[in-house]
Amino acid sequence: YGQGVSPIRELTTEGVNLSTFLFRYATQGLFGIYADGRSAGDVNKQFTAAVLALKNIASGKGVTADHVTRAKNQALAELANSLEKPADFAVHLGAEIATHQSLDQHQATPDAITKLSDKDIIQAAKTMISQKPSFVVLGQEAFLPYLEDIQSS
């Protein structure tokens, strides 16, 4: 899912920004939910709602054909845009080398995006939910939810 497309992003309310991120590496990756806002209490509520949305996706709820189609179209557009400028293309190739340790994959990327289904998204959400989360906090961490609260929600 990209900006403005994901069920998590759709939870954003005034004063709180929620988005997802993915950092890919050759053999592993890091996925997360980024939340920032004016008050720690609002961030707490929105972050907890985001985790619930992720759990709903993992259980097969909340993923519509429209979400999948929009996400794939956005990913393909972002990929095309990333290849237009020479400097952006160089960054894309660098990321590909770091991720796949070769340059062979860039032709396969649009095909892989096109082949994604709701089942793939559900499986990815199940994998994320089954992993032990980590928190990085800047600000009033005392107001954020405890790991046990998130896991039991």
Image (cartoon, helix red, strand yellow):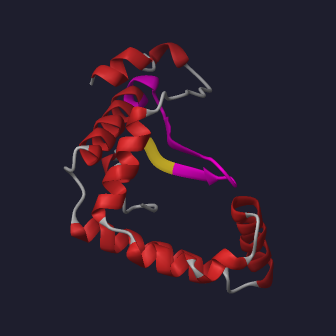
Q: Residue furthest bottom?
A: 84
Residue 37 lies in the magenta-colored region: yes
Q: Position of residue 100 (x, y in %)?
A: 70, 64
Is residue 72 on the magenta stretch? no
Question: Residue at coordinates 54% horizontally, 50% vertically from top-left?
Answer: 21
Q: Considering depth in this image, is 150 or 145 the residue closer to the camera? A: 150
Start and end of the magenta stretch?
Answer: 21-43
Q: Is residue 148 visible?
A: yes
Left or right relative to 138: residue 6? left
On screen, residue 134 versus residue 61, left or right, reads right
Report the front residue among 17 and 126: 126
Q: Is residue 23 left or right of residue 89?
A: left
Residue 72, given in percent of the width and then of the height, sits at 40, 73
For the point 33% across and 29% down, the residue is 45
At horizontal 66% and vertical 50% (from top left) the residue drawn is 27
Residue lying farthest to the left in this orientation:
61
Percent across and percent down for residue 110 are 52, 80
Name above or below for residue 148 compared with residue 88.
above
Is residue 93 rendered to the left or right of residue 127?
A: right
Residue 14 in view, yes or no: no
Q: In the picture, residue 79 is in which quadrant?
A: bottom right
On the rendered image, what quadrant is the N terminus found in?
Answer: bottom left
